[in-house]
Image (tube, rainbow, N blue to C red):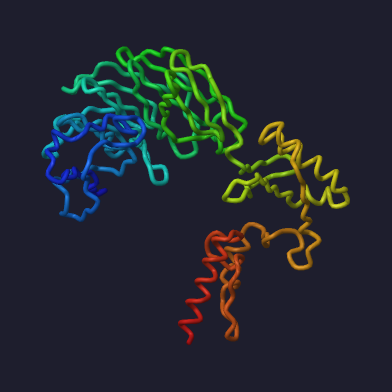
Amino acid sequence: MRKSLPAIVSILMLGVSPLAAENWPQWRGPMLNGESAEKNLPVRWSTTENVTWKLAVPERSGSTPIVWGDHMFLNVGEGSNLAIWAVDRTNGTIRWKRPLGGGNRRMMKQQMSSPSPVTDGKSVWVMTGTGVLKSFDFAGKELWSRDIQADYGRFGTQWGYASSPLLFEDALYVQVLHGMHTDDPSYLLRIDKATGKTVWRVLRTTRARFESPDAYTTPALLRVGNSTEIVITGGDVVTGHDPANGQELWRADGLNGQVVSDTGTVRSTFDNSPPDASFGALMGFIEADEMRELDSASVDEVKAAVLKDFALYFGDKAKTPTSFVLQRWNNEAYSRGGPVAYGPPGLLTKYGTALRTPANGIHWAGTETAGHWMGYMDGAVRSGERAAREVLAAL
């Protein structure tokens, strides 16, 4: 039996009455930018300090408590089920609970209650990671309900749907950015908050591959002069959309230099640009059989094959780099084919501990000896720390 977690707390506003405190009607707050106008907020907590009450909930949740007046609304996992709770802000008592359907499941650190509710002070809307979207009044009466997955197909994210709706004026804006486990396109919805009907649906294309099309972000609102835009971040791009019709107004791409592919000459890439962004640098790896086929190729021939894949991953601008450097690891005397050792499946399970076992007072460090993140800089640091602990213990 899983124990309840005392996860939800109301924080005393240093002498300010909770009823006089600012509302927090959706995930990014009253100004839709994550900012609050409140002053003199507490900056320290303990199990007792600056805590006015606690309320145990059955599951962990990634959602944000939504506050309006003396009401708080929580998206809650209840075992395999989901529910919205209305809680009295002043004392933490539960005013009412309403079911949001089944299908709750844990996916790494989150489960299907991650989307945060939204409210306009009269109604509250809540969406679940299973695609259920419902509207209630403050007394708990259900006003409408729909299932986004039933309408437009199953979500295909790697770690479960977790985006919150954006409430703006008379509409909810709901994004579904996915691709890891589906060939269906990503899309953005505008939904009438009073009826729950779709006003428009626009597709949001991307060159992103494998897990990169997935995003767990929430639509943002951008006001510039007299114009207002819905901004969507994910799938390796940021796009601005007209709230009236969903039309894409602009696009910023080139925001993700990491790709993993199971086809092509270059199977993995990384963004090696410096922190000051003074120039952009993409690094690609040609591995095993693909590199063997190019062992006798000229630099220009390798370059042509690499840039063909880069253009597929990042667009036509990747066809014309300012410079191109080829490092043939297979010609290195010690690595003989790669920056780190590559072993077949099962090798580390069977022999991995031998790489770390001290021998005649010699303690081994290096990324290949790491228990975690082998082959990466993080693994090198971990292995160095381990070897240092061994030496200290042996002194």
Left or right: residue 264 versus residue 297 is: left
Residue 149, percent from left and from top:
43, 23
Name the foreground residue: 129 vs 2: 129
Tell me where residue 249 sits by quadrant. Answer: top right
Left or right: residue 44 versus residue 179 is: left
Residue 327, percent from left and from top:
77, 55
Circle count: 0
Q: Is residue 247 above or below residue 184?
A: above
Tell me where residue 237 sits by quadrant. Answer: top right
Q: Which residue is rendered at x = 28% and y = 20% of the image?
A: 135
Q: Which residue is rendered at x = 62% and y = 42% of the image?
A: 257
Name the foreground residue: 30 vs 10: 30
Residue 103, percent from left and from top:
36, 33
Q: Which residue is rendered at x = 26% and y = 25% of the image?
A: 119
Q: Is residue 85 above or below residue 198?
A: below
- Hey, which residue is sitting farthest front in the picture? 225
Tell me where residue 253 sits by quadrant. Answer: top right
Left or right: residue 48 versus residue 229 is: left
Residue 353, percent from left and from top:
56, 70
